[in-house]
């Protein structure tokens, strides 16, 4: 199938593209930047530059490509700013316009990147798609959830198959250097002792390579509805720090020397029964193996990392 992928040069989108190619799809990779210099014009990936917040640009793109599938990953995720940024409002409007244009041009299947921030994070329970409270505490989570609510009402009357993937805590190659995992790798790579808080917060981490592969599988499966895209395994920040410290060979972490962050949810962990059993996808590698790969890719970028094996289930 011809599939449009927005945010295709981004942190998640680049791995969605790889997952679709592995499954035999033809991908129209859409990004804000120019076409990569090494792009093969005759290959399974066609690169297109488009400002998705420009209605005329979007209309032109969608009309010219006539894709039957769409995976929408693009959004504003500027570290530190995206939780409260007014850009979220523009992306709700831009996403709705994209979907309208897509349907008008014959689009039939869409998968959209949602977020764990749509859930109520005030409790400690494992988060389930149908039974957990959806009470976002940020503008980012509210914007994504609002888009989802609108599409849930709109897609059935427009013959559009919709899946919504709530991403939990992605990490991995290409992650913004200001985010947690790259910061930890850089700090520990210096060889100096690392002062840290208690490390007691608990999260659900999934390597971005696996996030992308999961989205491709959700697309292929025909699943309709909401699905958590996560590992389903809880990991304390302290254990994450220990994993990274072992990988970089510097285990001099001084836990408890910094105060614990205030106003941070204690536990954010997904129920992944639906992803594992209904969609039929599980990660191909453990978080420990993926953390090692990520450390290697950041410490030795020229050497790359081990090639991904295709995922089988």
Image: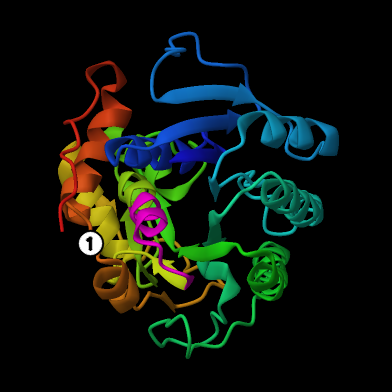
Residue numbers of the magenta segment? 214-225
Identify whether 59 is placed above or below 214.
Answer: above
Identify the secondary structure beneath mark 1. loop
**To which quarter of the image does residue 108 belong?**
bottom right
**To which quarter of the image does residue 68 belong?**
top right
State yes or no: residue 234 in magenta.
Answer: no
**To which quarter of the image does residue 88 belong?**
bottom right
Disc 1 marks which residue?
282
Give 218 or 143, whichever is nearer the viewer.
218
Q: How is the image coloured?
A: rainbow
Identify whether 55 is placed above or below 150.
Answer: above
Quadrant containing the N terminus in the rendered view: top left
For the point 22% across and 38% down, the residue is: 293
Decide if residue 23 is on the left or right side of residue 98: left
Magenta span main SS: helix
Give 184 or 165, whichever is nearer the viewer.
165
For the point 68% across and 36% down, the residue is: 62
The x, y position of residue 46, in whole percent, is 50, 23
Quadrant containing the C terminus in the rendered view: bottom left
């Amino acid at each position: 199938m011809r599939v449009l992928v927005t945010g295709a040069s981004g942190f998640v989108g680049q791995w969605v593209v790889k997952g679709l190619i592995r499954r035999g799809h033809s991908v129209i990779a859409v990004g804000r930047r120019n076409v990569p210099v090494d792009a093969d014009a005759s290959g399974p990936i066609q690169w297109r530059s488009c400002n998705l917040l420009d209605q005329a640009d979007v209309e032109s793109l969608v009309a010219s490509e006539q894709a039957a599938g769409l995976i929408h990953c693009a959004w504003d995720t500027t570290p530190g700013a995206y939780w409260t940024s007014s850009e979220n409002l523009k992306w709700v409007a831009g996403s709705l316009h994209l979907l309208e244009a897509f349907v008008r041009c014959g689009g039939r299947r869409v998968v959209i990147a949602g977020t764990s921030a749509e859930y109520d994070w005030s409790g400690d329970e494992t988060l389930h798609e149908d039974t957990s409270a959806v009470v976002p505490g940020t503008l980012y989570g509210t914007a994504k959830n609002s888009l989802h609510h609108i599409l849930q009402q709109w897609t059935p009357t427009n013959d559009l198959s919709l899946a919504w993937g709530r991403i939990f805590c992605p990490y991995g190659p290409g992650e913004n250097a200001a985010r947690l995992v790259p910061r930890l790798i850089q700090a520990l790579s210096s060889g100096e002792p690392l002062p840290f808080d208690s490390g007691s917060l608990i999260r659900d981490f999934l390597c971005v390579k696996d996030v992308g592969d999961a989205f491709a599988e959700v697309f292929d499966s025909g699943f309709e509805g909401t699905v958590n895209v996560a590992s389903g395994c809880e990991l304390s920040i302290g254990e994450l720090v220990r994993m990274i410290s072992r990988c970089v060979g510097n285990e001099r972490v001084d836990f408890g020397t910094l105060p614990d962050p205030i106003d941070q949810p204690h536990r954010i962990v997904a129920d992944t029964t639906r992803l594992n059993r209904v969609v039929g996808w599980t990660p191909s590698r453990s978080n420990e193996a993926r953390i090692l790969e990520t450390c290697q890719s950041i410490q030795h970028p020229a050497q790359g990392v081990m090639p991904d094996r295709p995922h089988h289930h």
